[in-house]
Image (tube, rainbow, N blue to C red):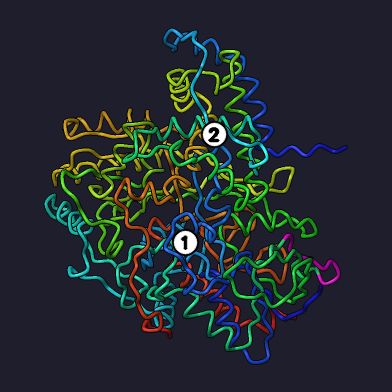
Amino acid sequence: MKIKLSRRGLITGAILGIAALIIPKIWQKSKSPASALANERERPNFDDENLIFFTPDEYILIYDLAEQIIPSEGEDAPGASDIMLANKIDRFIADNLEQDVQNDIRNFLETFAAGSDALRGQGFSDLTPEEQREYILFWKNFPSLSLLRGAFLALKRLIIAVYFSTKESWDYIDYGGPLNVYVDPFRGRVL
Amino acid sequence: MRLSADVVIVGSGPGGAVMAKELSEIAGLSIILVDAGPYVLERYYQQLELKMTELFWERGNRVTDDLSTQILQARCVGGGTVVYTGTAHKVPDFVLNDWAGRWRVEGFTRGDLDAGYERVASNMFITEHTEEDWNDNNRLFVEACTGNNIGVENLKRFVDKCIGCGFCYQGCKYRRKVTMLNTYLPKAFANGVQLISNFHVNEVLYDPKTKRASGVKGVVKPTPPLAERNSVPEGSLEINARLVVMAAGAINTPSILLRSKSLPDLGAALGRFVLMQNAHNVHILMPYKVSMIRGIPKAASTKEFLDSHRFVIAPAQNHPIATANDVTGFGLNWKHLMRYFHNLLQWQVICGDDPHFTNYVYLDSTGKTNVRYLYSPDYIERQIAGLRTCARLAFSIGAERVFLGPTKNGYVTNRNMNALDHHIHRKYFSPGRFSLTTAHPQGGCRMGGNPKHSIVNSNGRAHRINGLIVSDASIFPSPTHVNPVYTILAATTLIALRTKEDIDKLLE
């Protein structure tokens, strides 16, 4: 069987290999003492069968990542978990994005998760919230490989896009959404 | 399915629509105009940021291969004219001098292009904005400039009776923006041009016997909801034509030509010299609420630094998704900032990079279009200079914080005002560390006098094969440094008129 590997996939793979070797050393220097406590945060029960695009592992990863980017603060300031953003992202990707963009997202998530495994021997979702934040900061500012920083930007872009298309987020920032006025479309000049 | 016509035009944006309308005035010439995107009429546009990314390639997720730069390119009938603010800038003299001097482009003098601009203006409608049109974002921008003795000019836009709804990037549902959809395309259709939408061209065909391009081949994809019905059924489609006009835009035109394996070598410059012209958004936190997302998006700009530093500063208008995307960071502080969305002004620094052979479009092993791009040191310096100027202007009108990319934390405060050169610095300009966006990509099929260094001549005709014309921003050998739409329209008008003159010879 002929395996088709995209150039981006090849680069991602290569970087992952390099990163797996070098990240632990840099991480150990930059990291504060790790919490040995198991991550006992509650996550919503979800039915695997309701997921359209994400695998269960990917779902938990995007759930935690989204909550780190848009944390919950209560009713007036809904965070990602308050509005089940991970489910909305799942549906958005499945319904709207083309296959190659879907593949890219899957690659980014895989890279992100694998980096965490290489660092700690633990998946991203097994880290405490504080450790997750440190890991994201480390990733976001990764010194030499722009692809790793770019992967974070791409995931952030996806999470933000879905979050700020919800009514709850509009209420939070007092954004009015579409202009609800009727303007005769035919008054515009047509030459 | 197989169709045939005298001319097939790939792309219905500014390049393709102008060609279609101008060539359709030749009696008896059959023309098929194809586009990869849907044909969505204005009344179906929704003022929703995420929803309307349907009008962009990869839903706005097209990026350079290091993932650092988002490339926004329209994928809809009407192309970029549908999803931009409508600004009408003429290309500066130094750009034309560069084209003529360095790249041996003939026939694109100021006089030539002015004739093109004039013809475009007679087919469209341009409004010059005045002080009455300014919202807070524009007014404070002008105040900042005049307070610092920096000249500003009122902008001209392709709009008519704009109501200032603030949704230019989502397409104007009120038909107040003058686009290809309500000018050139209806005229072309009236003259008998057939439109095929949702048609993804895979390759340009070549006839080795006649040694000329002989058509295009691709797949017609399903028509999405709300789009107009297509004129052909879904599935494979081959269109045979005596003249092929590529107007799919920078990135896409070179990508299709690279994919066309039956074509002979078009030159080493194919796909090369891609140009990023970034609009770097700057978000300015004011101590009071301001009107930014309603009103005219761009009513004024300053070109004071164009000749000396090659950048332009102008107001911008982004809704929450684009704003949140631009503001560096994540977590609680970042989220709290978004609560002050209505205290934000948005300006942008527009700056074009220089042409480099090492910046190019390529296809990966799966056939997907990719762009490899490294910013030149000179570009970074100019961009930094523009951002520093922007920050100075913002603090001079009482801004509390200015959010922009190349800083340590993603922003500078008014306490940093006297040390902006230190805080906004090239050492922070690392791709991927902050969001970079371009909506003005150019190059990749550059025109020029030397076939070794260019793909087409100044009439848009391929140097090495007959029957192939390129008519879009991919032919620009160096960036326009201002919004390129008006210049694409004018340049392709010139190419269309020259094609018209020689049509018999070109079809032979």
**Position in image of residue B42 (x %, y %):** 47, 73
In three-dimensional space, the C-alpha distance between marks 1 and 2, rounded to whole angstroms, equals 52 Å
Which numbered tag is attached to residue B367?
none
Using the rendered image of the protein, determine whether residue B261 is visible from the camera's viewpoint: yes
Name the residue nearer the viewer: B211 or A175.
Answer: A175
Was residue B366 drawn as part of the magenta stretch in this picture? no
Q: Secondary structure at mark 1?
A: helix
In the image, residue B138 sits, relative to residue B287, either above or below, namely: below
Q: Amino acid at mark 2?
A: Ile
**Can you identify the residue that label 1 sits on?**
B100
Whole-percent x, y for residue B33 in the image: 64, 75
Q: Are marks 1 and 2 in contact (CB under 8 Å)?
A: no
| Amino acid type shown at disc 1 | Ala
**Circle 2 is placed at which residue position?**
A62
> In the figure, residue B392 lies in which quadrant?
top left
Return the x and y of residue A162 as percentages of the image width and height.
48, 46
Q: Is residue B41 left or right of residue B463?
A: left
Q: Quadrant of residue B57?
A: bottom right
Residue sitting farthest toward the bottom: B27
What residue do we see at 68% from left, 91% from top? B28
For label 2, the crowd category at 10 Å Cα-Cα, with few meaning under 14, some 14 to 19 and many 20 or more, is: many
Q: Give the prevailing secondary structure in the magenta stretch.
A: strand
Figure check: B28 above or below B375: below
| Total numbered badges shown on the rendered structure | 2
Tell me which chain the residue with mark 1 is part of. B
Residue sitting at 66 percent across and 36 percent down? A48
What are the residue bounds of the magenta stretch?
A: B202-210
Residue B102 visible, this orientation? no
Give the foreground label among 1 and 2.
Answer: 2
Query: At which x and y percent is residue B413?
Result: 21, 34
Q: The numbered mark 2 sits on a residue in which chain?
A: A
Please name the residue shown 49% across and 46% down the image.
B70
